Image (cartoon, grey):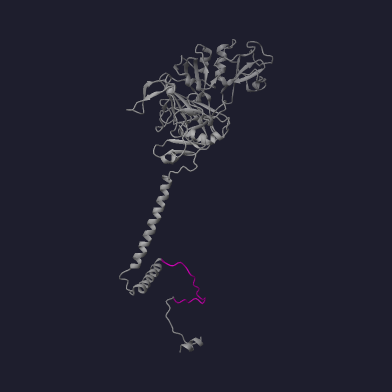
Amino acid sequence: MSDNRENNPNSERRAFASRTPASESPEPLKYRRGFVTGHQVTGWRFVMRRIASGVALHDARMLVDPLRTQSRAFGMGAVIVITGIAGCFLLSLMRPSGIAGTDPVLADRSTAALYVRVGDNLHPVLNLTSARLIAGKAVDPTMVKSAELDKFPRGNLIGIPGAPERMVQAKSTDAAWAVCEASDNRAVTVIAGALDTSGDKAADLPRDRAAVVSSESGTWLLWDGKRSALNLTDVAVTSALGFTAPPAVRPVTTRLLNAIPEAPALVVPAIAGAGSPTAYPLPVAAPVGSVLVSYSTDNTPVHYVVLADGVQQVSPVIASALRNANSYGLEQPPRLTADQIAHLPTPSPASAIDTRIFPSAAVKPLAANEDPVLCTRFTRTADAASDSWSLLAGSVLPLSDSVHTVQLISTAATPTRVAVTPGVGYLVQPSGRGGYQWISDTGVRYGIDTEADGDKTLEALGLHKPALTIPSSILDLFASGPSLSRADALLSHDSLAPSDRPAMRIQTDNPSAQAQESR
């Protein structure tokens, strides 16, 4: 019968029942392969284990499954091996084998002492900055065993005494520097970076406010980010500034005063040919040096001064100063209409008055007990073409609570403190002086010698351009440190003698405070 079925394809086959739902569609059904379900996979695995149990153990009841126990043990062993390999890899990163190899800068794993290779010799080096200058690249020290270090011929101690231990450049590309002084203790604080002007902290001084200060160089008016010499006995000027009574004069140190840009002295402008008639016709009788007035459409007075070759618009302060000095018998400034002013000649730049030397309006001086903290701030953004100066006043230093100051030891006579974000420093270039310098978070400035090796010195220190602009007057307030160069780093020493630089003993019972004992 089987032979007949094989030879005759149309012979009757054994029927079977299909569980596929019947379809009434005239189109033939097409089935495509898709993803199986989780239950199907689990069932297939169970069947395979049952078949394996029947073949290996001659028992398909699955009362005991030793094959599954074997697979679990194999998987657990694989996990343990992989974990061990990963742990060894991490341990090699955190604690290398301690082989020196060809690394130029080495560190003793047990004592953290630094060494640098120079030729075949291994030299103890004073600091990482010196080691990087000698190596010529910003490499980190390789931690090695003491026995590995002892294999090299030993050289003399080399390096730059006092060079910074860390040189991490701040990411900011905008220059921001401030110098503040408190009237209660006369201490000067130099601040690097952005200021916190919230609350009672020193904030920008309004344009209609000013401060009258005095120092060894005389009396000064601080206004609009600058300082101008002021003679308080010159009533013509003080009245024009709006001082109805003698202003309160607060003493300041030369450190703060020198940090503020100096403007021309506040004196009555000198006018050539004052008092003589003009060479051009005027609608009113007014000699050279007199003041005219016109009114704008909103009835605001606009003042002009008569010069030898024309009339020039001036601020109310300059007009008042000129009239206070000499009004030429005119009780009131002659009034001209707008069209009359328009037909008058304008003076040449050589004879014109510099109107920037006076405030554009009267100012109100700070009282003696008002805003004891005075600051000057210098800013220059990366895309700015010019600098910006401003004055700040308030009750507290404009510092955030997380920033602490460091007192400079070399300025004990005039206390100076520095506020720099810990862990970072600044690559700066003084305006008008050229060379690069590094300002550390301890308030010390280091000159960087780029004349011999050019930018390779910056690369060796891990620094990059552009450098931030800093005024020379503010840069000089930081403590002076040694110059950073490869030639200085290669200087060898038998030992280091005590430095003649000023020093101060730290109190061990209160490390945050400085003791008074110094040398």
| Residue occupying image coordinates x 50% and y 18% | 221
Given residues 391 and 54, the one toward you in this image is 54
Quadrant in which residue 513 is drawn? top left
- Residue 6 visible to the viewer: yes
In the image, residue 35 lies in the stretch drawn in magenta:
yes
Q: From what the image shows, is residue 328 above or below residue 135?
A: above
Task: Note whether 44 is above or below 274 in the view shown.
Answer: below
Q: Is residue 452 left or right of residue 6?
A: right
Q: Position of residue 440 (x, y in %)?
A: 47, 30
Can residue 478 be seen at all in this image of the molecule?
no
The front one of 351 and 294 is: 351
Q: Nearer the viewer, residue 81 or 7?
A: 81
Indicate whether 35 appears above or below 163. Answer: below
Residue 98 placement (x, y as % from top left): 43, 43
Q: Which residues are magenta?
A: 21-37
Please give the count of numbered marks on the rendered protein.
0
In reply to whether residue 30 is colored magenta, the answer given is yes
Rendered-image quadrant of the N terminus: bottom left
Using residue 335 as the reference point, say whether residue 377 is left or right of it.
left
Quadrant housing the C terminus: top left
Q: Residue at x 39, y 54 (%)?
A: 83
**Which residue lies most toward the left here?**
63
Q: Position of residue 367 (x, y in %)?
A: 43, 19
Up/down of 25 relative to 87, above or below: below
Residue 120: x and y in percent read 51, 37
Q: Main secondary structure of the magenta part?
A: loop
Q: Which quarter of the figure has residue 314?
A: top right
